[in-house]
Amino acid sequence: MDAPRLFLMLTGAAATAAAVSCSQAKKKPEKPLNVVYIMCDDHAYQTISAYDQRFMRTPNIDRLAEEGARFTNSFVANSLSGPSRACLLTGKHSHANGFTNNEHGIFDGSQQTLPKLMQAGGYQTAMVGKWHLVSDPTGFDYWDILTGQGDYYNPVFIRNGEKVVRPGYSTDITTDVAFEWLEHRDADKPFCLFLHYKAPHRSWMPDLQDLGSFDEVTFPLPETFYDDYATREAAAKQEMSILADMNVVYDLKMADRENEIHTPEQPWLEEYGRSLYRQDLAPGETVEGRMDAEQQAVWDAYYDPIIAQFKRDNLSGKALYEWKYQRYMRDYCSVIRSVDRNVGRVYEYLEKHGLLENTVVIYTSDQGFYMGEHGYFDKRFMYEESFRTPFLIRMPGGKPVKAAKGRTRVLGAGFGHRSNDIDEFIQNIDYAPTILEMAGLPVPDDIQGESFLPLLRGEKPANVMTSEGKGWRRSLYYHFYEYPAEHLVRRHYGVRTERYSLMHFYNDIDEWELFDLEQDPLQLHNIYGEPGTEAVTKELLDELHRLQKLYQDPIEQTL
Ligand code: SGN
Ligand code: CA
């Protein structure tokens, strides 16, 4: 098939924007559309200032939204790395693409995927950075992936099957590798680049130049920080509590070269934390995935006085809990500074090479993340903070999208409405069909997601079968499987509508939770089974069953 043409596929506002800014190019042949898909690992929308201004500024990421659209209701299908990546690649829910959890999953790379379909449509495809799907990537002309979770310092990559250790900081290097590939690509063909940063995954190790960036900041505690989980048994049953489970050594770096920190409540955890953490730092025989001596010296010079102070203060109880939160936020936000800087580098590269006019740039994360809400870190739950994921898109030409008036929805903290906000529900199974449609390529019938390109054109799409007939999606399906496993979040599935979120935790627990997001946006009060909720519960259960049938989730058979 011929390389697709940008102006054939983008009609309406976005295409006009591109056409106007390229007006002098009328006589020149139309340029095909390129795709740069940037995905971070665990990037909470709460720490993107386009979404939330309580914590930090991300000017480069925000710029993408200003020159395109901000999706205010963007969700994942299964809030975990491998499964999310599999949803992106296939446009299908976890049970359908076969990759349900990180612990036992091996992605079946022989199946139909987005990069393969792009290749077949004349695209050059590349995957750079975190892959996390165990089997070797397929469908990419070039792949250069971090091993497993990847390392922050001097990371090991596998480049088309061959091991390469690259000195420096992971986020910078991942961008450098992408630039290197762009330099050597065939400029006569369009490209689709997947740029997947490891950052800001646990244990939130900042670039040396960003150490201390937030030392003067005292972060506000989230409203639900002291959640007592009353009415929510499943919410209480987890190991992702900042107080109880975040490790002061492994996560918060409170061990210097000589000393061990002793926490009476969890001595084994501290021990585990120390060996893992210092191992990441200490230069061993090689620096693969570890710091070299010079990097370590800068690192220790920053942390040593903080460790000394921590020991002197000998905090406990509430004071320790809040101290942990502040340290967590400082490290995490410092890691994001480098991500934002690198998004700026990508933008500059595209600008310098005249690619901004015909390249769509997407910024997202593999899932949301808790920044202390409900007292948590990590993700997994169908609760809003981890069910949602940021999704910002810069359209070719850079003109803000004029979104069709959406319906008013319950939004999270810090959202103020903008004219280029798209409020309709999108989910990560929609990315593949959207990208295909943007590229002017056919979307195979077995893809479960829907293209949201019409939303970007300011149109109201009518392609999804909803409970009320055809229209755009009015409910979302979710299914999380990784249990028993780290963090101990129980298996659950559920449905979310504009107003309600219903979830069922199963396996070694049988718990239903229902939230009225209009009355209780913070999800503190489970109203499942309360008198007066019978009708809405029935409606939601019907919708849940409809979605499980539609997507053919085998769990439907057990209900
Ligand atoms: C690691 C982390 C977990 C995290 C998972 C999954 N532990 O196992 O805290 O939930 O990754 O994250 S660590 O001790 O290795 O840091 S995911 O984003 O890859 O799904
Ligand atoms: Ca992740």
Image (cartoon, rainbow, N blue to C red):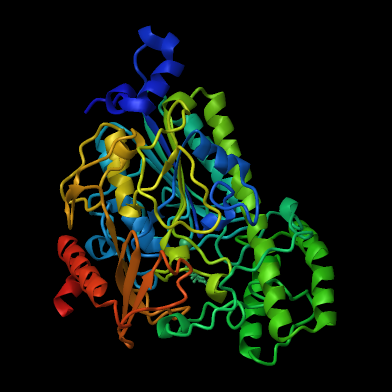
Q: Name the residue rendered at 28%, 28% in the picture.
A: 9
103 or 75, which is in the foreground? 75
Q: Is residue 135 visible?
A: yes
Q: Quadrant location of the C terminus?
A: bottom left
Q: Residue furthest bottom?
A: 264
| Residue 238 x %, y % | 47, 81
Q: Which of 451/418 is in front?
A: 418
Q: How many marks?
A: 0
- Position of residue 181 measured from the top left corner of the image (x, y, whole percent): 48, 36
Q: Is residue 545 above or below residue 529?
A: above
- Vertical placement of residue 398 versus 147, above or below: above
In the rendered image, which quarter contains the N terminus?
top left
Where is residue 77 shown, x and y percent of the image? 33, 61
Image location (x, y in percent) of residue 295: 74, 57
Q: Residue at x 47, y 60 (%)?
A: 368
Please tell me which residue is depicted at 17% across the width and 73% down the height of the picture.
556
Q: Is residue 299 left or right of residue 436?
A: right
Residue closer to the observer: 403 or 263: 403
